[in-house]
Each structure stands twice: as C-alpha cells, then as structure tokens.
C-alpha cells in the first residue's frame, strides 16, 4: 500500500509576535510541522504498519511544498522521525504564502509524479491559515473520491471503511481506493519520536523537486489576495468581582452585561 | 567552543517534553507525591517511548547515547517531573555497573526489565554504621557450595522494596584492607530472608527508601557481579556519572522553580504594582538566573569531558558540591518570591524545596565532595609546581 501524506511546514504559531500596530511578525518564528498534519502522518503510518503486518508491501511518503525556508535539516528529521519512509519536498520561494488553490495544484502534480498511489491523506487544515481547503481541492484535481472530517479509517480488502464526523452524527462510508482523505485531529494521537527513530530519520531518503520539474506553468497564480493580517485588539480585563447569593450575583451580572452593551 | 546541541538532541528533548506534558503533568506528579506512590504510569510511559533504553547498547535492545544526551534527558526530566529525573538518575549507576561487570544473563534479564519499565535496580551500600564511610560496611556473604548466604542490614536503600534486585555490597571480615574486601552482588529482592522497612523522609515521597534486613538469605553463587573483593573499585567506576545525572536533574528542578518565580513576579500585584517591579525581587530573580546558568554550564562541561574520555575526578565532586547547594538556593529563593503561596502544599515549589535538600546528602555529602576535590586540587598544584 503506497500512502502519500501531505504536510504543511509553517512558522510555529506559538512564536507569533504581535507588534504595537497590531501587525503580525513571523520573523523570529521557528518552522515546525503543522500540528493538524501530525495526525494525518500518524494515520498513514498506522495503515502502513497494519498492511505490513498482513504481509503487504507498504510505504508512506511525506509530501510538502513551500518556500526555501522549509528545506531545513532538523525539520526534515523531525518529520521523518514520525514514521514516514521518505520525504518529497517541492521547494520554491514562489510558494511563500501560496493560497489553497496553488498549494493543491502543486501537490496534485507532485502526487502524479510519484507514480501509483493508493491513498492520499491530509490534515484537517493548515496550522497557519486553517482554510481546510487543500485536501478537497487536491482530490478534485486528482479526480479521486475525496472526503474530509474523517475520524476513523479501517482497511477492508481493496476498500477503506471510514467514519466521517458530522455535526450531530457519524457517517460510516466505504471508500474505494485510490482516494484522498482529510482526517480530524481526533483520529489518533501522533506518536512521539524515540531517539532510535530520530537517528534513523537522518538516513531516510529525501527528494527535492523544483516547480520547474513539476511542469506547472501558470497554475499557481494566486486566487486569493491577502490585504492584511492583524491581531485582535487586546483589552485589559475589567476584573469586576460580583458578590452575594447566586441569584443576586446573576442579577448583577445581567445588569453589568447590559451596561456594557453586550446584551 | 560550540554550545549548540545536535539536531538529534534537540528533537529528542522536544519529544521528551511533549511526552512529559502528556503523561506526567504537574497535577499527576503532585498526586503521586501526596499519596507517596511510585509514579508507575509516567515511568512506564518513559519506557514505552524509548527513554529508558537510552545508553543501553543495541545488542540488548537499547539505543546508544552519549553522556551529554543522557545529561540533557535528566535535566529535562528534572524540570518537568523532578521525581522522574531522580529515579532515572538512580538507575544510571546500576545500569552501568551491570553493563560493565555483570554476566551475560544479568545483562539480558536486568536491562530488558529496565527497558520494559521495571523500577531501577536498588543500590545497597549504606548501613547503620557505614554512611559517608561506606567502606565500613559489615554485611557478609558466605559461600556455601554453589550458593551464597547473606547476613546484614542496609539503610537508605532507595527503591529496594519496589525493585526486582538489589546491587548489594558485602564485606569479607577477614580482609585487612576494606577496599580490597568488598564484593558486589545482584541479589533478587524476593530471596527468602530479606525484609524491608520503609523509612519516612522529608522529601522524595514518591521514591521510597528502605531499611533492608537480611537474615540467612541464600542465593546461587552466580549472582556475583564482576570479581570477588573487587566491589569497591567496581562501585567507584560509575559514581561520577551517577552524580552527574543527579546534578542534571537538580538543575532541571532549579529551572522549574525559576520559571515559577518569574511568572509569579510578573503577575502578583502589591502596593499597586507587580512585585517584579521591585528591585529586591529583580535581584533575587537575577541571582537565580546566574546560578542556573553556572550550574548548566558546569554539568554540560563535565558531560563533555566524560564523552571525550577525560578524567573528572575532582571536577565532578566540585560540580556535585556546587549544584547541590546552588539548586537548593535557587529553589529556596523561588519560595521567597512566591511568599506564603510557595509554602503551601498546593504549589510545586514546596515539593521541590523538600526534594532538593537531599542532594546535599545523597550521592555523597557536601563534605565528602570536599574530601574528594580538595586533595586532588592540591595534588594538581604540587605537580604543576
């Protein structure tokens, strides 16, 4: 079973600096693996392990696209120590800030270049923009059965039986392979790499592709223009303490919220 | 001089920190302490994630790691869950002794057990009359055919009641020179004739220590570790790394206390301002940071020297002496910054304060560290003159 798992490498959201004018700075942020994608990596590795245990040849290829900054030795080892067998990176500074359409176009072309693939897995959304679009657009571009919000995957011969989380119900669906699935964060906790896996990661194959090698002319023109990104204005807490019986406190709370124009 | 960690070390520590946040959060460690229970679940999580396999050769299923990496692991454990750091550090010496001097059967059995989550092998040295003067021990081992019969009493034998084995030191009473009359044994704790009495301590509540009464405990002769009457040099061979591991965990604890103190100083408001805006508090914070930086540099240097194969005879004793005192001072100062809150049992600083105090006593007292370092320093100066 050949599984491709798409991973977005982004500046670590916890390193975001908000400047005095409300603008966002990522200059000092370290790059990290999108935290919603780690569950997809884990799901891919578990499926491959199960396939291997059943005597089937299996491989997990991690696929990522982004600017030059993603091609960092530590970042690559971090990703590969989570279980994928190899890593393919499409690296080009033209991909800095790429929107979902461009990212899906690049990933789709890269998947085609990888040869026969049984399953493509994506995370719920990216760690930086969280549009939740790439998995769906990627499936459409590859003309494959495509589902999102997948919270459970089980192999049943040549098909997958998946659970899809909806607002009030869980759909159980049979999906023929190949397919493109986006998994929820609840599907499985990502494993933590051991020293053994970390040491092994440095020896796993990494392939770097350029946009030119993908022969993708014109397809990554942005469909969305980001005008500005600003942090919400921070206000000091008012620290109002309400005392009295529960009834009195509730009454005071309603009065206070009315006074503030909230209700 | 390159102070950077390797990428592999950074990734390992990142992974360990996440593991500790998941499996050994402060609330859980506080609960184990309060109930005076060994932290079985978190310890098993360390085993399941390969942390307990570090430093054990691949042929026994482990993952080789240098001393610097083990030091970083101890420091990280110490910072997030000091109890785990101590337990880990206690295991370092017994693992090394068994690896270096144990039989193949001992290595297979004990190392596999440790990697699967067994508590570390307890170290049975101290006796009622033999503390800092460890060579004054009296526990005897008498060979009787293919068996050996043990009699004696051990004290402060940490983890003995939980471990599967004690690395037991015995003395041949006929030997004139005590240092040439001590033998080392790997005695199973379920051997008939062994009784444990748990000792109450000020700290280390999750890491029980015992009095061990040994009366006619008979075991096969092949539990001898290394050679007869070579127990003392065998024991000394790995004391340096044990002390380094204890120091690293202590530095982690001091870092945790520092973080608690600065967080509180930035939040706590008195006289209309945060207490961190008072110079007196800023001085305390700065003194703590300087000590932490010094301690960290000291342990990293010792680890580096050991990885380079350099002798650390007096350096490690100076390091243990300094870290045991400085880490206590940092945690004590953190308690001062936190005021009344730091003295309540709700806050981890009080637990660190109780736990860290033992570092000036266990693993060799401050005074013994002076005794090791002082003569060596003078000898070095004489040689240079």
Image: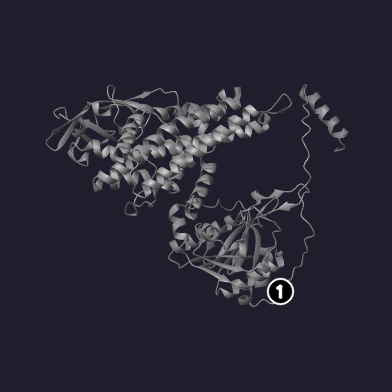
* Left or right: B187 as drawn, with respect to A238: left
Q: Which residue is drawn at 60% across and 51% down?
A: A186
A60 on left or right of B168? right
Q: Residue A227's image quarter?
A: bottom right
Q: In which quarter of the image is residue B270?
A: top right
Q: Please name the residue shown 60% across and 27% down the image.
A: B337
- Element under label 1? loop
**Placement of B94 over or under B152, stated as above or below:** below
* Picture residue at 71% right of the left edge, 74% below the top: A219
Residue B101 visible within the image? yes
Residue extending furthest toward the front = B385
Location of residue A178 by image quarter: bottom right
How crowded pointer 1 is (Cα within 10 Å; few <14, some 14-19, many 20+) is rated as few
Q: Identify the residue at image location x=54%, y=38%.
A: B25
- For mark 1, what is the residue? A219
Picture colour scheme: one colour
Q: Where is residue B76 in the image (x, y as percent from the top left)?
A: 49, 42
Q: Is residue B366 left or right of residue A23?
A: left
């Amino acid at each position: 079973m050949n599984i491709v798992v798409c991973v977005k490498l982004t500046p670590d959201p916890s390193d975001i600096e908000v400047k005095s004018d409300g603008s966002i700075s990522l200059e000092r942020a370290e790059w990290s693996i999108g935290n919603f994608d780690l569950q997809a990596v884990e799901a891919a590795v578990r499926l491959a392990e199960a396939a291997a245990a059943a005597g089937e040849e299996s491989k997990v290829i991690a696929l990522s696209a982004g600017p030059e900054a993603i091609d960092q030795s530590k970042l690559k080892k971090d990703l590969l120590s989570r279980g994928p067998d190899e890593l393919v990176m499409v690296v080009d500074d033209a991909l800095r800030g790429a929107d979902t359409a461009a990212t899906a176009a690049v990933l789709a072309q890269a998947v085609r270049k990888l040869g026969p693939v049984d399953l493509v897995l994506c995370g719920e959304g990216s760690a930086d923009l969280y549009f939740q679009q790439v998995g769906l657009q990627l499936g459409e571009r590859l003309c494959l059965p495509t589902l999102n919000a997948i919270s459970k995957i089980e192999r049943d011969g040549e098909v997958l039986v998946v659970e899809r989380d909806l607002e009030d119900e869980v759909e159980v669906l049979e999906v023929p392979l190949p397919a493109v699935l986006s998994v929820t964060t609840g599907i499985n906790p990502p494993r933590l790499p051991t020293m053994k896996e970390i040491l092994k990661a440095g020896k796993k194959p990494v392939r770097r592709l350029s946009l030119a090698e993908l022969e993708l002319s014109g397809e990554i023109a942005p469909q969305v223009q980001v005008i500005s990104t600003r942090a919400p204005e921070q206000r000091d807490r008012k620290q109002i303490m309400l005392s009295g019986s529960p009834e009195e406190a509730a009454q005071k709370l309603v009065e206070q919220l009315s006074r503030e124009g909230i209700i | 001089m390159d102070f950077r960690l390797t990428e592999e070390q950074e990734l390992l520590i990142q992974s360990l920190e996440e593991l500790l946040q998941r499996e050994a959060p402060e609330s859980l460690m506080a609960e184990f302490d309060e109930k005076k229970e060994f932290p079985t679940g978190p310890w098993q999580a360390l085993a399941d994630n390969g942390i307990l396999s570090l430093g054990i050769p691949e042929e026994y299923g482990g993952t080789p790691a240098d001393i610097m990496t083990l030091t970083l692991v101890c420091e990280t454990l110490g910072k997030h869950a000091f109890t785990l750091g101590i337990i880990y550090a206690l295991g370092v010496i017994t693992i090394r002794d068994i690896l270096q001097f144990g039989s193949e059967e001992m290595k297979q059995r004990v190392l596999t057990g440790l990697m699967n989550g067994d508590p570390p092998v307890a170290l049975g040295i101290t006796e009622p009359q033999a503390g800092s003067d460890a060579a004054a021990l009296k526990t005897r081992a008498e060979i009787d055919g293919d068996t050996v019969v043990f009699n004696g009493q051990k004290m402060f034998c940490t983890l003995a009641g939980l471990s599967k084995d004690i690395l037991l030191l015995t003395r041949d009473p006929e030997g004139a020179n005590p240092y040439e009359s001590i033998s080392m044994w790997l005695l199973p704790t379920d051997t008939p004739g062994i009784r444990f009495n748990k000792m109450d301590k000020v700290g280390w509540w999750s890491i029980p220590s015992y009095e061990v009464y040994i009366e006619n405990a008979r075991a096969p002769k092949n539990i001898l570790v290394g050679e007869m009457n070579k127990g003392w040099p065998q024991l000394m061979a790995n004391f340096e790394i044990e002390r380094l591991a204890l120091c690293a965990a202590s530095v982690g604890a001091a870092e945790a206390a520092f973080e608690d103190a600065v967080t509180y100083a930035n939040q706590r408001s008195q006289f209309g301002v945060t207490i961190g805006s008072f110079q007196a508090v800023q001085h305390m914070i700065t003194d703590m940071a300087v000590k932490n930086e010094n301690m960290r540099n000291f342990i990293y240097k010792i680890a580096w020297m050991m990885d380079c194969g350099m002798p650390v005879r007096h350096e490690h004793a100076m390091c243990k002496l300094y870290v045991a005192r400085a880490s206590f001072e940092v945690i004590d100062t953190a308690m001062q910054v936190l005021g009344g809150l730091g003295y309540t049992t709700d806050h981890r600083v009080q637990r660190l304060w109780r736990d860290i105090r033992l570092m000036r006593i266990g693993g060799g007292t401050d005074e013994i560290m002076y005794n090791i370092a002082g003569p060596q320093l003078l000898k070095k100066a004489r040689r240079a003159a």
